[in-house]
Image (tube, coloured by chain):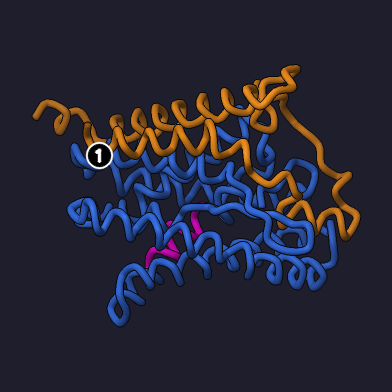
Chain colours: A orange, B blue
Amino acid sequence: MKWWHVGLLISLFIGGFLSLFASPLPDGLERVAEDFGFIELEQSVITSPLPDYSLPGIDSPISGSIAGIVGVLLMFGVAWGVANILKGRNEHRK
Amino acid sequence: MHIPDGFLSTPVWVGMWLITLVIVGYALRKTRGRLSEKHIPLMGVLAAFVFAAQMLNVPVAGGTSGHMLGGVLTASLLGPWSATIVMSSVFVVQALLFQDGGITALGANIFNMGLIGTVFGYYLYVSLSKFIPKIISAGIAAWIAVVLASAFCALELGLSGTVPLKTAMVAMVSIHTLIGLIELGITMGVLGVIMKRRPDLMEIEKV
């Protein structure tokens, strides 16, 4: 197993399992927005496919787990792809 | 600390988009053709790890939680410009697919939570590591990057007229001095494991 396989597995474990135990409490900015009464200004310009790291309409921990796993794999793919493009064609032939 | 749409005034979010585009554009130019075979999997893994770690909200104090950002950790391994690309991709995917952070606010979010860590945090880490061990330097730089990110977030909210500047500044900075400790802990923990198990990964050329 290569080092980056290990890194990816750890990330999948965090995103797909440990994240189920994440605190649902508001984060620092949400807390300040609630305390000082501007939280209701929040709006959404777009509708995302996996809002709030869950599958819409599925009220089960599996929903968060799947969203986490999809996100981790997608992030890995996106960053790998962008890096590969930036590496350039000449380097690629080596 | 992901700012949703609706919190920032148009001049502020447009301004932050422009600043971010200039810095990310510069990062693309600096990385083009300079990445090696080793950078590519590391960029993939760090993007995946940062995404996952940002899902882990930890309770801090007074009914508030926080999560790590990851900019200094990423830059300490990859270098400032390739780390800028990694962190920016994370915030783009979070905003588009997970509705975490707004679209108009994306420029501000990339700047606050990404670029402050990958650029300012990175050079702070490099400067500190001339005097103290790398791992401690990274922890301190990571903590400062989070506190500074919260100060910039407060500044943007204040300039937008969403909340008085002083109120936002005091509230954001005070809670993030605590939330920043998560950043400090995970940054030092991950670098500690890498230094012990795969010290060669620390030596990848910084781009």
Report x, y in % for residue A74: 46, 26
In the visual, does A32 lie left or right of B13? right
The image quadrant that residue B72 belongs to is bottom left
Residue in the picture at 52% in, 65% down: B145
Write down the residue under mark 1.
A3
Above or below: residue B6 compared with residue A67: below
- Measuring from the top left, give residue B19's x and y in whole percent: 55, 53
The chain identifier of the residue carrying mark 1 reads: A
**Residue B154 in which image quadrant:** bottom right
Residue B8 showing in the rendered view: no
B96 left or right of B156 in image: left
Type of secondary structure dominating the magenta stretch? helix
Q: Which residues are magenta?
A: B114-123
Q: Residue at x 55, y 41 (%)?
A: B91
Q: Residue at x 45, y 47 (%)?
A: B24
Q: Residue at x 66, y 38 (%)?
A: B100
Three-letter residue code for mark 1 = Trp
